[in-house]
Image: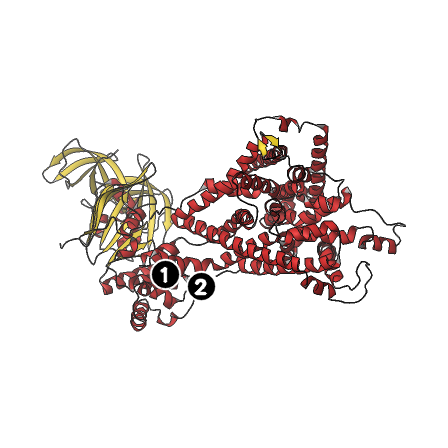
Amino acid sequence: MSEPLIEIRQVSKSYGNTLILEDMSLSIYDGEFLTLLGPSGCGKTTLLRMISGFEQPDAGEIYIAGRCVNQLPPQQRDVHTVFQSYALFPHLSVFENVAFALRCKKIADSEVRTRVMEALSLVQLEQFAERGIQQLSGGQQQRVAIARAIVNRPQVLLLDEPLSSLDYSLRKAMQSELKQLQKTLNMTFIFVTHDQEEALSMSDRIVILNQGKIAQIGTPRSVYETPRNRYVASFIGEANIFDIDVQNVNGKSLQTIVENVSLSCPNTGDFQAGDRLHLIVRPEDIRVWGLSEIENSDGMLPGKITEIIYKGSTVDLKVKLASGKIISASEFFDEDDDKLEYSPNENVWVQWLPGWEVLLPYEN
Amino acid sequence: MKTKAYSVYILYIWLFLFSFLPLLLVLAVSVLSKDSNKLVTLPLTLSNYAGLFTPVFAKILLRSVLIALLTTGLCLLVAYPFSYFMIKSRHRSLLLLLIIIPFWTSSLIRTYALIAILKYKGLLNALLLKWHIIDAPLSLLYSNFAVISGLVYNLFPFMVLPIVNNMERFDFRLLEAAQDLGASRWAAFTRVFLPGTAAGVLSGCILVFLPAMTLFYIPNVLGGARSILLGNLIQNQFLVLEDWPQGAATSAVLTAILLLLLACYRQQNKGRAR
Amino acid sequence: MKRLGQRFFLGLVLVLLYAPIFILLIYSVNSAKFSLQWQGFSLRWYQELFQDRALWEAFFNSIALGLCASLLATVIGVLTCVNLFISRQKQHALYLLLLLLVIIPDLVLGVSLLIFFNLSQIPLGFFSLLIAHITFCIPFVVLTINARITTMDPNLYFSALDLGASRYLALTRILLPLLWPAVLSAFLLSFTLSFDDVIISYFVAGPDFSILPLAIYSLVRAGVTPELNALCSITFGLSMVLVVISHRLSRKTT
């Protein structure tokens, strides 16, 4: 790994008596698409604002390209922001909006023209150059905001929940456009969102924040498949969580009891007999079988269907287990598997393949 | 990026010097004594306040309050239906402008315009005589009637604007809901509309009552020498009698009464908002 | 039928509201001196007015005072509002003080300033009037501009900074152009308030500096004259034009 472009060293920030960020350290590399993910109030926007220069850390330093920028005002940082509300200047045309950053640097008119049109073509809005802002749709305004921020070719582009006000199909389209754009420009994008699906589909790396601290950093896949703690497991994707005790350990696998059924799974965390663990299974990893389909129900949990939600490409089921615990299962329609018709209160068997679960140390 | 709002300090200093401080000085002067040379002098005394506990002052205060109440009531009576019709009308914005114009233009001039109408040989008398409603011209000017007319005429827009503001935000679907539940039109009006617009009415009343107590040139111009209201009294004490301490004391009492009314209004508002 | 009744009521009130002014206007072009009879159209009272030097002096004094006071009040008001908007601080004490200023009757304000000027040895004249006028105009300026500025997205200013503008550029290229209608409207309103003020000016004007409202006031106390009718018609007309312009401006959306 090369030297990080942005380094956040032990940064803390409070508003009044509330601690927003606590002793946070993070390295961001040139050319990556990094997402800050978390619920409202977790500090992601504050972190973004500290990188752009609109907030100062109470403690710690921020380095951009090797230089400490704590005292550097936003105008002088090579970092631009795309705001959630776009903040397009209503009294300027699309062209002038995009040209603004260049005009601040007193760049010659001819060069301004070239660079603005180049930026507009990157977001496919060349014909709209002379239009007023009010004449544009939400999606178009979004793109102008992006063009305006990249025309200067900053080293870093910060995006503060830019897609949150778009409708579903537009959002999906913009997600892939933004990803394409980032690859074309080879610019570092720092993206803030609370939508985990968005984070998973766009990012090179995801930083999951929980109440001012980093819960996990990793690629989308690692964060989804190997969550490090309970928070991440339930924040990203859905999770069925069982609290279990390790009965005994044989070599690379361990024995435990889930819902009065004895199960064996790989000992991924080097756990010992007697350890208390969380056993986490994702709904799509759970297989549901009708009673008539199964002869040997070893290693399967008995349950009863309480809810059936048809979702088009999948069927989500809520199954009530013997102890009363309700778990989620998600099954894809498979034309070969004709048994996908369930009835409420039907008795079923529930299983997952060993190794598809995640084991984590127990947390209170 | 938190920058200090330095130029706000300019405003703070200005307001302190030319607003807060002078008001404090009024209080200070009210407890000093009158002096023919320097206008105010020690010793400190409460005699100025004592001087207000006289039947003369009580009478003036009472008259001022009554006239102000009457003015407020009349304004309300006309302004309430006017506001309602106005927001229902197609020419709403034009009507609003027509109400705003008198609000911001010189009320002295508008008061003066009333003289030509109200005086002995004025227009009103001429019309009444012409239509044989009366036999001899009425002496309308220099009377309570003239003063109240002048006050109502001038302060009417002050009543309309808050009421209109409030009525515009009234959700008229509430009336439909009430009628749907069985209320008669009258009941819907008194039980839903009236309470719903009460906030605007209260604001309007305050905006009329306060000036009605203190505008001195209207009673001066339309009421003549006989009509002494609180505003004229204070004006008199300061500029004619040159008894500043007494004038200051009267002003202080007046302000206290008004602030008390406002405090009651705020209490009402807070209770309502819950 | 009900519609007709409503329109009649509206019309009646408006007629009553504007009739006195209208009558004033008519009599200002009535060639009769004292009678109410119509004796023919005449502009002679306006001519006499134009020759009245004392009134001209008062008129120009009022204009000068109004321009200075509204300019300064607007500048202070704009600076304050913009600064509060940018720094995102809530200044409750300030709003309370401004509210106080609006609530306290002109009478008490005039009296308090009279005492203040006397005790601080500031002579009563142009400067005392200027200070007084600026003081009572400021709350209205702040109110007008705040009404507009609070509907603006603060990120507009911050994004200008983010894109590399200096604070000065962000202010002049982005904030002020968007605020312009409100600023102008506030300026016009202040001017009108200052131009028409009687009560506060009454106490702090002093004997040497004559202003129009006070000149009108003493003439009014003397009685109805045609020349006064002409004067009032002009002054009223001027204020009305300013109010209409200001109203149109404040409703303009970008």
Mark 1 and mark 2 residues within 8 Å of each other at the beta carbon: no
Q: Quadrant of residue A295?
A: top left
Kind of residue sitting beneath label 2: Gln
Q: Sequence-wise, which precedes: disc 1 or disc 2?
A: 2
* Viewer-closest of C69 and C90: C69
* Direction from residue A215 to residue C52 in the image, left or right: right
On the rendered image, what quadrant is the N terminus of chain A found in? bottom left
> Mark 1 sits on what residue?
A142
Instruction: Name above or below for residue C204 compared with residue B267.
Output: below
Q: Quadrant of residue A77?
A: bottom left
In what element is the residue under mark 2?
helix
Estimate the x, y position of residue B124 in percent, counting from the top left: 81, 53
Estimate the x, y position of residue A300 in percent, counting from the top left: 24, 41
Residue positioned most to the bottom? A110
Kind of residue sitting beneath label 1: Gln
On the rendered image, what quadrant is the C terminus of chain A found in? top left
Instruction: Name above or below for residue A307 compared with residue C239.
Output: above
Please name the residue shown 83% across and 46% down the image: B139
* Viewer-closest of B233 and C161: B233
Spatial CA distance of label 1 from label 2 is 12 Å
In what element is the residue under mark 1?
helix
* Direction from residue A150 to residue B19 in the image, left or right: right
Dot 2 surroundings within 10 Å: few (below 14), some, or many (20 or more)? some
In the image, are marks 1 and 2 on the same chain?
yes
Please name the residue shown 43% across and 62% down the image: A90
> Mark 2 sits on what residue?
A134
